[in-house]
Image (cartoon, rainbow, N blue to C red):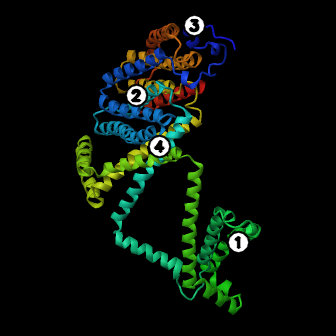
Amino acid sequence: MTADTRSAADRHAPSTDALDGDVDSDAAESNWAPARLSTALVLLGTLGLTAVLVAETGLDTPVFVGGVGAVALAATLWLADRDRWRLPATLGASLLLLPVGAGLAIGVGYTLLKQLAGSYAVGSVFVVIGLVVAVFGAAAAVRDVLTVAALRRMATVAVTTLAVPLAWFAVLATLALTPAGDLLDEGVSLVETVLFAPTPVGQPHLTTFWLLVLGVALSTRTVLRALPLVELVDDDTTASVESTLATLDTFLSRLVRWGAPLVFVFLVVDYLAPDAVLGRLPAAVAALLLVVSNATVLRELLFALLVVSSLLGAALWGLKRLYRVSTHGTAVAFTPLVGGSLVTLVAFVDPQAILDTLLTTVTDLLPTAMGEEFSYLSGTVVEFYGPETVVLGLVTGTLFAATLVVSGLLLGAWLGLLSGRAAGASTASSGLLVAVALSKTVGVGAPVVLAGLVVSLLVWDAGDYAVTMGREVGRRGSTSQTELVHFGGSLLVGVVAAGTAAVLAGPIRRGVVDTNVPLLVALAGAAIGAVCFVVALRIAD
C-alpha cells in the first residue's frame, strides 16, 4: 500500500484535470456550482437595470408583484430538482405554484388595466413582461436550475397539483347549474335507460349489450392474469390449472379481439338501418336477438360482473405497483395532491373578503363606464355561483396559468431555446433586451436604452462564464481574479460599442428616420426586432 504523502491542503484542493478537457465535462455534482462572482454580477446587473427602468417608467407595482412570482417560479424549479429531502421539497414546489401564478397574472393584468385606463403608456406591458422574465432568469442562474430535468419534474408537479382544485371546481360549478338531487336522479335514470332497460322496447339493443360482454371479458382476463392462482394449488394439479387458465385466457383474448369490430356492425343494426338488417334474418333469430339483448336480468348480471372484476383488477394493479415502487417514491408522487388540497382550502377561508378586495381593485382600475359594467356582471356571477365557487375558480385559473408557464418553458427547452450552459443567465439577458428595446416607446431616454443594451449583454456573458468556470474548477476553486479580468474586457468592449453607437446616432437619425411613423408600427417593429435578436442569441448559445 502506497502512503499518500500530500499535505491536507493538497488533498482537498480542487482538481485541475478538467481544465484540459471539455467545458461540460465532469465536475462531480457535489463539487459543481456556478462561479460566485460572475453569478453575483448577473444578479446585480439584472436588478440594477430593472431598478433604473422602473424608476424611468413608473412601473414599480406590476414589476414588483410579477418579480415576486418570478422568484417563486425559480424557487419551484430548485425545489423540484432536489434529490435530498425530496418529499418536503416537492410539497414546497406544489404550494409555491399559487404565488407563482398570482404574481405573474396580477403583474401583467394590472399593467393591462392601467393601459386600458390610460394611466400607463402603450407598450408598458411588454416592458413589464421583459423585466419579470429577466428577474426569473437571474434567480434561476444562482444555481443554474433552468434545465430540462427540473422543468420536466416541475411540469408533473404542476399538473398533479392543478388536478385537485380543478376537480372540485368542476363539481361545485356543476352543482350550481343543476341541484345535486336532480343531477343524481338524471344520472341514475340515464344509466338505467342505457344499460338495464333500453328503449324502444320492441327493438334489439345489441350495441350496449355487446359492450357489456366485451367489458366483462376484458376485465375478467385482466383479473385472471393478475391473480396468483397457480401458486395457490397443489403441485399435483398445477399443470391442469395452468392449462385451464391458458385456454380461458386465449378464449377471452380472442373474444375481445374478434368481438370489438362487431360493435360497429351492431351500431348499424341499432341506429342506422335496423329494419333493413333484421328483416333479412329468420324470424326466430331476430326474436332471439330481441329477447337476449333486452333481457334486464342478464344485463344486470353482466354489469355486476363488470364492476366487481374492474374493482378487483384495479386493486391488484395498485398492490403490484406499490410492491414494485418504493414507499418513498409513492409518497413523493402523491405529495402534489396534498399540495393541491391545501391550495383548494384557500377558497374556503373568508372567500367574500377576498372577492370584495379583488373586485373593488379591478373596478377602481377600469374606466368609469367599464368599471360599472364589470361590477354588475361580477356581482351577478358571484350571486349565482356563490363566493366559494368563484374564488375556487380564480385559484384554479391561477394554478392553470402557472402550469402553462412551466409547460411553455419545458416546450422552449425541448425546442432548444432554453438549452445551453447558462439558460438562466441567457433568459435574464433576453428579458432585459426586450424590456430595454421597448422602453424607448414608453418614454425612456436614449442614453438609458443604450446603457441597458450593454448591461443586458454583459449579464449574458457573465452568466455563461460563471457556468464555464464552475464546471471547470468547481465550487472550491478560486476564480475571482479570472472573472474580474474577463468581466473587465467585456465591459470595455460594451462601452466602446455603446460610444460608437452614440456618436453615429445623430447623423443616422437626421438622414434616415421618418418621424411620421405611427407609434403602434414602431412598437411592433421594435418588438419583432428584439424577439428575433433574442432568438438568435439563444440559438448561438
Q: Is the C-beta separation of discs 4 and 2 under 8 Å? A: no
Question: Which amino acid type is marked by label 3?
Answer: Ser
Which residue is denoted by mark 4 in the rendering?
Answer: 404
Q: Residue 7 carries which label?
A: 3
Depth check, front residue: 169 or 280? 169
Q: Residues under labels 4 and 3: Cα distance?
A: 54 Å
Badge 3: residue crowd in 10 Å (few <14, some 14–19, many ≥20): few
Please provide percent x and percent y for residue 65.
Answer: 33, 33
Depth check, front residue: 214 or 534? 214
Of discs 4 and 3, which sits in the foreground? 3
Which residue is denoted by mark 2 in the rendering?
Answer: 131
Secondary-structure class at tag 4: helix
| Residue 317 shows up from this direction | yes
Decide if residue 170 is on the left or right side of residue 24: left
On the rendered image, what quadrant is the C terminus found in? top right
Of discs 1 and 3, which sits in the foreground? 3
Q: Residue 255 carries which label?
A: 1
